[in-house]
Image: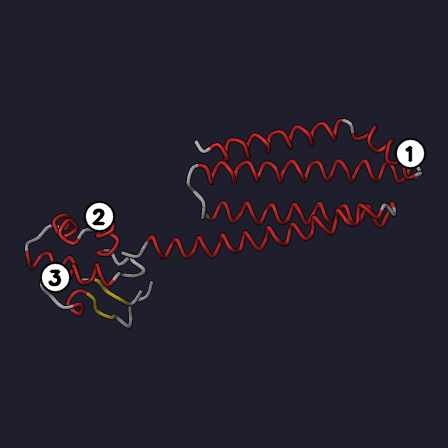
């Protein structure tokens, strides 16, 4: 199998483990952020913690979709309807993470979260465009397969 | 698709098998089956040329337009 697919999937697993690690360390990280930015731990800190867990769940789902997408491409199934669906799912997950981060930014006034949220929304749009390109390629491949 | 393919009729008239035709025109039997069963979306000119040469006919003998047929 191509090394780039092995490495990509390995890194996806590493990122998934990192996400789990960050989720486990969530309360300590929130303590640090609250101390650094001088925000109340019992109110806004808890908001950050809950949204952090929500983002971790979204990230795990996105990483699962990426892993399946990479596996599918490695098997030679590139322009398939299931891959188009995976791209759309990833776009929705990016948008969800962006919305969570933007909501956090509004509630906690931590403006770097706004930047992260906007980046995630932009990423979601880009992934949606790539998904649409895959969908066009899938339809073209279907026609080409039936050209004798 | 409103285009009907009459390869099976042409083959029957010439007492030729589909496998022989596929070999003669250089396509796989699976692709010839797609063409015969009206599943093809397009036909290359090179395939059409080979079909006409092997079957000794005109494109109009192989394909007809059926206005009432829909898929």
Q: Residue at x 29, y 67 (%)?
A: B2
Q: Is residue B22 left or right of residue A7?
A: left
Circle number at residue A35: 1
Could you tell me which secondary element the residue under label 3 belongs to?
A: helix
Vertical side of A32 occupied by A145: above or below: below
Q: In this view, does A7 lie to the left or right of A16?
A: left
Q: Do the residues labelled 3 and 2 touch (CB within 8 Å)?
A: no
How many neighbours does mark 1 have within 10 angstroms: few (below 14), some (14-19), or many (20 or more)?
A: few
Mark 1 → mark 3, Cα distance in angstroms: 84 Å
Q: Residue at x 45, y 37 (%)?
A: A74
Mark 2 → mark 1, Cα distance in angstroms: 71 Å
Q: Which residue is drawn at 43% across and 37% down?
A: A75
Circle number at residue B53: 3
Q: Name the residue under label 2.
A: B28
Q: Residue at x 69, y 32 (%)?
A: A19
Q: In this view, does A111 lie to the left or right of B46?
A: right
Residue A109: percent from the left, percent from the top?
Answer: 88, 47
Which image quarter: residue A61? top right
């Amino acid at each position: 199998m191509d090394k780039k697919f092995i490495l990509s999937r390995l890194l996806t697993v590493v990122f998934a483990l990192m996400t789990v690690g960050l989720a486990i360390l969530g309360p300590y990280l929130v303590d640090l952020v609250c101390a650094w930015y001088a925000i109340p731990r019992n109110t806004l800190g808890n908001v950050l913690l809950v949204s952090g867990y929500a983002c971790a769940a979204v990230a795990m789902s996105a990483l699962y979709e990426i892993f399946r997408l990479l596996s599918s491409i490695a098997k030679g199934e590139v322009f398939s309807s299931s891959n188009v669906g995976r791209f759309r799912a990833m776009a929705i997950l990016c948008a969800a993470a962006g919305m969570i981060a933007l909501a956090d930014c509004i509630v906690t006034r931590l403006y770097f979260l706004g930047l992260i949220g906007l980046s995630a929304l932009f990423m979601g749009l880009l992934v949606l465009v790539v998904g649409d390109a895959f969908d066009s390629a899938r339809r073209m491949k279907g026609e080409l397969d039936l050209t004798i | 698709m409103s285009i009907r393919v009459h390869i099976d009729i042409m083959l029957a008239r010439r007492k030729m098998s589909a496998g022989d035709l596929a070999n003669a025109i250089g396509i796989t039997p699976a692709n010839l089956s797609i063409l015969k069963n009206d599943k093809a979306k397009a036909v290359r000119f090179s395939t059409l040329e080979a079909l006409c040469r092997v079957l000794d006919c005109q494109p109009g003998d192989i394909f007809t337009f059926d206005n009432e047929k829909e898929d």
